[in-house]
Image: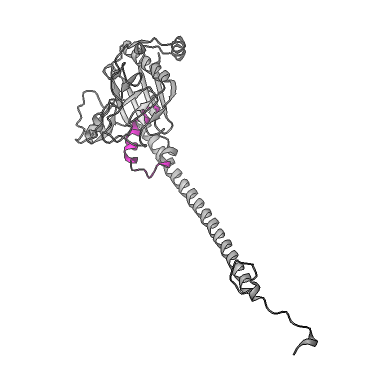
Amino acid sequence: MLAGCGGLKPGSNAKAMAPLKQETVSRLTGLGSSPGAAMMVRIFKESSELEVWKQTSSGAFKLFKSYQICAWSGELGPKIKEGDRQSPEGFYTVTPGLMNPNSNYYLAFNTGFPNKFDRAYGRTGSDLMVHGDCSSRGCYSMTDESIAEIYALARESFKGGNASFQLQIFPFRMSAQNLARHADNPNMSFWKDIKEGYDRFEIAKAPVSWDVCNKEYVFDVPSGTSLDALGSCPVTVAQNVPDTVKAKAAADDAAMATEVASLAEKAAKAAAEAQKAADEKAAAKARGEAIGSFIGGLFGGGGEAGVIDPTKVPPIPLPRLHRA
């Protein structure tokens, strides 16, 4: 039973303390941000992308950079249990204590799995990391160069006074088209749950505050509210959905229904065309066999189709005068 991608590699932590490249600092400045500003990370499994977002002087977050993920484990869907080789999905909080400067996989930070939501479902797993070394067994693996920059960005954000950064992990970009492609996936209910957090970020361009009640993610919970992950959600929490988020969800649901119908129509058409081609092939084969049988019958059959058996050739008629 493999337990994720943890472990310490004895030695210097010089890699973890390497300064940001001047090019990176300049890019942050051009974005209206700084190394010490707050950051957020989003991961999309299907497209193997990791995004780093940074807070700007205006307060809004802007996309700083998108990195290609070398490898992630399992299939689309959340991690369920230790050893399933599945990479997690959901909302996580990364603190300085989850950073690993001496990782066996160059550099790493722990995703924080299992979180409150995962524990509500009894899900298990440990050392689920974002790390270097381009290999994965339940984690998200980056190139060493990429994790070095991401690690340094997180380190500088913590130095800037930020206590944590948010990690959002999705199966794919939560568009109506992508949801429609996976409409029959058993994880759809869970994905619709985390989509609300995705939509809130897309609209506000700021990390969401999240909690769990009724074994569901809830977002932007009023401060001072204490929630039981297994208990019912208070009305003030259950109804705390902005009109803009409701409108986006309704529009996406309608678009998804249209897309599902369109995909079903295309699938039915493709199946009909495939059946037609199969029928035509079978008919052609049947005609060929019938012709072969006919020719064989003319010459008494036997042997290969179209080959005359010399022992069964009809007698050649004699001239009239020689007939008995």
Above or below residue 262? Residue 66 is: above
Q: Main secondary structure of the magenta part?
A: helix
As drawn, the residue found furthest toward the bottom would be 324
Above or below residue 63? Residue 194 is: below
Q: Nearer the viewer, residue 162 or 275?
A: 275
Query: Looking at the image, which residue is at 33% across and 40% down?
Result: 187
State the image coordinates of residue 308 (x, y, percent, origin top left). Answer: 65, 70
Displayed quadrant of residue 83: top left
Stretch of the chain drawn in magenta: 180-202
In this orientation, does residue 292 appear? yes
| Residue 41 magenta | no
Query: Looking at the image, which residue is at 24% across and 33% down?
Result: 124
State the image coordinates of residue 70 (x, y, percent, origin top left). Answer: 42, 27
Query: Looking at the image, which residue is at 56% across and 58% down?
Result: 281
Above or below residue 279? Residue 224 is: above
The quarter of the image holding the N terminus is: top left
In this orientation, does residue 60 appear? no
